[in-house]
Image (cartoon, rainbow, N blue to C red):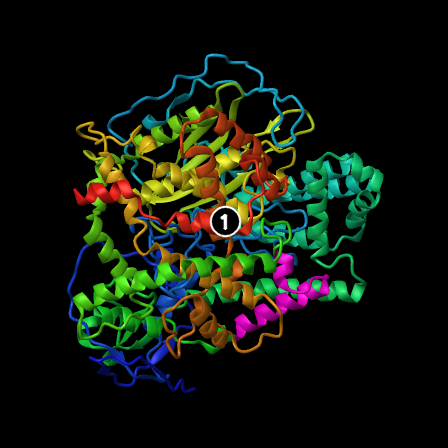
Amino acid sequence: MLLSLVLGTRHPSGLSGAGLGVQFCAKPRRGRSSRLGAALGQGHPCGLSRSPSVGLSSISVSSRSVDRGRPTALAARLARAVQRSFLERKPTEGDGSRSTLRARAVPAALAGPRPPPGLVAGRGVLRCPLPARGGAPRGARRRATLWPRSPGPPGSARSRGARALPRKRGAMLCARRLGGLRAGLRVRRVSTRWSPVGAAFTVQPQGRRLDWSGERGGLFGVPELSAPEGFRVAQEKALRKTEQLVRRVCATPPGPRTVLIFDELSDSLCRVADLADFVKIAHPEAAFREAAEEACRSIGTMVEKLNTNVELYQSLQRLLADKKLVESLDPETRRVAELFMFDFEISGIHLDREKRKRAVDLNVKILDLSSAFLMGTHLPNTIEKRVLPERIRHHFELAGEHVVVDSLRAEAPDDLVREAAYKIFLYPNAGQLKRLEELLSSRDLLAKLVGYPTYSHRALQGTIAQSPETVMEFLEKLSDKLSERTMKDFEMIRGMKMKLNPQNSELMPWDPPYYSGLIRAERFNIEPSLYCPFFSLGACMEGLSLLFSRLLGVSLYGEQPAKGEVWSEDVRKLAVVHESEGLLGYIYCDFFQRADKPHQDCHFTIRGGRLKEDGDYQLPVVVLMLNLPHSSRNLPTLLTPGMMENLFHEMGHAMHSMLGRTRYQHVTGTRCPTDFAEVPSILMEYFANDYRVVHQFARHYQTGQSLPKNMVSRLCESKKVCAAADMQLQVFYAALDQIYHGKHPLRSSTTDILRDTQERFYGLPYVPNTAWQLRFSHLVGYGAKYYSYLMSRAVASMVWRECFRQDPFNRAAGERYRREMLAHGGGREPMLMLQGMLQKRPSIDDFVNTLVSDLDLDFETFLMDSA
């Protein structure tokens, strides 16, 4: 089969390329999840480099008979790695020091969506006919009718300022209502096993696997999970309980108890599935991973049965059909009942038998296509080594007579390397193109079958935006406001390119990430290594505890896990303790690098909080996963500014989970609409960039010197360099996502739509014979909801400006933030939560103006730099 296409753009210094044999690997090669980063938005170096560059032009591509031994072996290994991974995290503006799957300040233009920052990860792809609802899945955040959204989702030698343990061992909970939880809860007593949080991270982690010999408890304290075989025991126990609850709810007269049993049914499945979903990608032992994978499949099969259980559906329908009964329900119970019903109906259970079968088949097809498309977004391409100039071959991995191109190499100083990687990696794959077209078409057919005009209308129900019309209004107004600033950014980037490479100064999509990094380095002299000594992991964790204590009355304490409770000896367990309410929940910190660990920064819900029948509260349990370097004998774990910001971001998700006190686990914590789920985590980034907060903990690990204010100011201002162009790129991604999930049949091919949308919403030229949309992995987990990144940032910025900018330690504002936003999880409409916090209902113009004003440079910092 010949792929006789020409990849190339005209360059003054053009290199006349020989025939370039491109081979699409049948399977992805083994590698870290970080190898996927180029398609997701890479960062850029801070150092200047003047590598000579020539253009790569007119490269003809044909498939040839090649030795598939080595490439195929590589592909098979990567396939296994990718199968254990889940969707990426969205990047946010940073300093370029983040891990590959987290954001850099300026992502690779057209290199794929910025991975979501820390979004909450959860369940893997299950063969359940029901896709996620309005706040739908990120990563593996798939959701079945009775399946809550599992979103989706730093030691110092000096231990400073740890709060003393609460003195009252039996204080009652605060009387105020939080998230509709009216019942008096029993306070969790203080444990003598707790230690200051900073001390928990000063012990040098070795990164070795735990000794599994001898008697031990189970993972996360679940007794059955002391061995891989325990997953079968746990799942069988959950399935037996599920069958009992189904019988009970079908025999229960309609009323509030119906919703309670539905939630207990959901909880019994999630307590196995959520935990298994984490273990199958993060546990170092293959036997545990495989057992967890099997548990996910088993639970998925049960979910399919529940989705098509008409009697179960009718038990909920009887409740919602009785207007008097519905009016008697409290707002949270009514919303949860409606969410369960929504999930039932998007599976088509309310349709006649023929249409119901069609809906189930479409859901299964969509999940299969989603899985296949996601795998395809990460497939590397191989080319014949001889057709690339010898001087650039070492930038790519060699496989015999072939070169493996698995990313966009957006950080490479050599223009030719970036250009070659862009054209080869984004070369269109016919199979992947067909999968995308079938996925979009199937989603549209399903949406119409269950009563929605488009898939986007279905996906946006219950979100802040509510409708695709509102989303497009938001994106178009934002694009108009950004237009002039974006052009100035492009001119600045073009000027830097001309300065370094005058023979080839045309600005192309592979240029902004690299050259904006050079501009940042030149203008602000930001070198991450200068900041690292001030950000030891223990100090940063104490800083977080101090912030939460002053703002929310919450402190973090280290707790020694029992034998067998954690999966690696460097995992730390934190108790989250309120000054009057006692123990709120647990955070397991899987912070350090180890072999075969996914290179993703994210939050996992392991167990959701809920009010149990005995009046006790089921404490939430979460995992935060980062990829930090280990400490050494003489050096604690030191964080770059980007790592520190990531830590704050992920802790925002964790506190959302801890402080939510909903009656139902179905809507606990981060189980809320996508365009609201990122608000608490992004808000934490504003705290991480405020000198008044940073000053409380940023001390040199050797001298104790405070981080100078001008260094913090310069770091914050450096993130605004070319930020308009960066945001414009996000607008383009979001608009493309909306068009793909809008009216069908599409007016033209997905590639033609890409080209037209790029011209309208971005500004840099489309490169012929590339198909960036085939690397747009967020189309799987964020279909019709990619705009959520921008809207969540707008909301977080408004909350920061209105409530915390004047005083980041304002306790009254912190209590209002918990009461109005965090406490409700997904149990209240997001716009109502925002309205309660801001004391007004924000408009689209408010969102747009807030985002644009964030781009303005600080005049005080400018004068400081000019002095």
Expressed as whole percent of the image width and height from the top left, the position of residue 765 reads 37, 73
- The number of discs equals 1
532 is within the stretch colored magenta: no
Q: Nearer the viewer, residue 565 or 111?
A: 111
* Quarter of the image that includes the C terminus: top left
Decide which of 88, 772 is in the foreground and name it: 772
Where is residue 246 drawn, in percent x and y? Answer: 75, 43
Q: Which residue is mark 1?
A: 847
Q: Is residue 103 left or right of residue 432?
A: left
Q: Quadrant of the N terminus?
A: bottom left
Res. 562 visible in picture: no
Label 1 SS: helix
Counting from the top left corner in percent of width and height, residue 9 is at: 31, 79
Judged left or right of residue 78, residue 363 is right
Taking 406 as reference, is 221 above or below it? above
Can the viewer see residue 560? yes
In the displayed structure, 468 sits above or below 593; it is: below
Instruction: Tell me where the magenta segment starts and ends, as one range.
Output: 434-459
Question: Is 822 situated above or below 316?
Answer: above
Residue type indicated by callout 1: Phe
Q: Residue at x 52, y 77 (%)?
A: 749
The kind of secondary structure the magenta stretch mainly shows is helix
Q: Is residue 626 left or right of residue 603?
A: left
Magenta stretch containing residue 446, yes or no?
yes
The front one of 485 and 731 is: 485
Image spot of residue 676 (x, y percent): 54, 45
Q: In the shown orientation, is residue 399 left or right of residue 607?
A: left
